[in-house]
Image: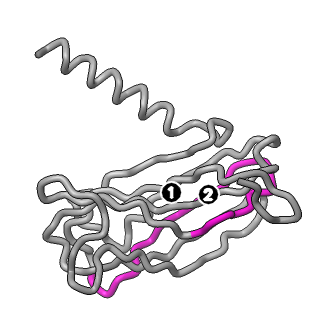
Amino acid sequence: MNKLCRIVVVAGMLLSAAACQPLKMDTYEKNLDIPGHEWSYAFKPVFEVTVQPQDTAYVYNIYVNVRHKDSYPFSNIWLQVHTQFPGEKPVTQRVELPLADNTGKWLGSGLDDIYEHKIPIQQKAILNKPGTYKFTFEQNMRQNPLPDIMNVGLRIEKAGLRTNEKAIP
C-alpha cells in the first residue's frame, strides 16, 4: 500500500508539472485552489500561458474548469474574464458558466459530493502573437464570498490549423 501511495504521488507531480507547460504540448491546463472554499471578490486567479511562434498557426478552444461542492447554492457562476495579449492592455468579458440544468441537476461529473465542470468560453480562438497571454478570473456574483467553490482553472486545447481565420480539424 505504501508503495502504491508513492507511485500515485509521483504520477500526480509529473502530471502537474506537465500541465503548466507552454502550448507546444497541444494543451495547457492549470487549476488553483480557492482559499477556504469561499471565492471572494478580492481573490482573482491569474493564469499565464506562453505561446511559441510555431503555435500561432493554430486555433484554440478555451475552457474554464470549476470544482464545487454539492452544497453550492446556485446553478451558475458569472465571471469577469480579463485577457491580456502580449504587449496589449487587458480586455474584459463577462461570462456565464452554467453548472446545473433547469431541474437543478449538476451538469459536470461528480464523485460523492464534489462536482467538476469543463465549460467552454471560446471556440477556435486565435492566439496570433507569440509571447505570454495572461488570463485573470474574477467572480462576478451578487454574493461575496461565493461559498463551496473549491477550485477554478483554465484549459486551452489546440483545435486545428488556422487558414483564413478558420480551423481545419
Q: Is residue 45 left or right of residue 76?
A: right
Check disc 2 and report the residue beneath it: 134
Secondary structure, mark 1, is strand
The x and y percentages for residue 131 are: 75, 48
At 68% across and 63% down in the image, what residue appears?
Answer: 124
For the residue marked with disc 1, what is the amino acid?
Answer: Val
Q: Reply yes or no: does residue 73 show up in magenta.
A: no
Instruction: Name the residue located 50 percent from the left edge and 57 percent from the top edge.
Output: 46
Which span is picked out in magenta?
122-143
**Residue at mark 1:** 46
Q: Tell me the SS state at disc 2.
A: strand
The image's colour scheme reads: one colour
Q: Quadrant of residue 24?
A: top right
The secondary structure that dominates the magenta segment is: strand
Of 86 and 148, the residue lying toward us: 148
Residue 82 occupies quadrant = bottom right
| Drawn side of residue 125 relative to residue 98, left or right | right
Q: What residue appears at the point 24 percent right and 80 percent down from the top-left corner?
A: 74
Question: In this view, which residue lies farthest toward the top?
Answer: 3
Instruction: Pick the residue in front: 87 or 125.
Output: 125
Amino acid type, mark 2 = Lys
Mark 2–mark 1 Cα distance, whole angstroms, equals 7 Å
Give yes or no for contact between labels 2 and 1 (Cβ–Cβ under 8 Å): yes
Tell me which numbered mark, 2 or 1, is placed earlier along the sequence: 1
Q: Position of residue 162 (x, y in %)?
A: 81, 56
Pointer 1: residues within 10 angstroms few (<14), some, or many (20+)? Answer: some
Relative image position of residue 134 (x, y in whole percent):
61, 57
Q: Residue drawn at (18%, 12%), measured in percent from left and top?
A: 3
Locate the N terminus and report the quarter of the image it occupies.
top left
State the residue in front, 74 or 43: 74
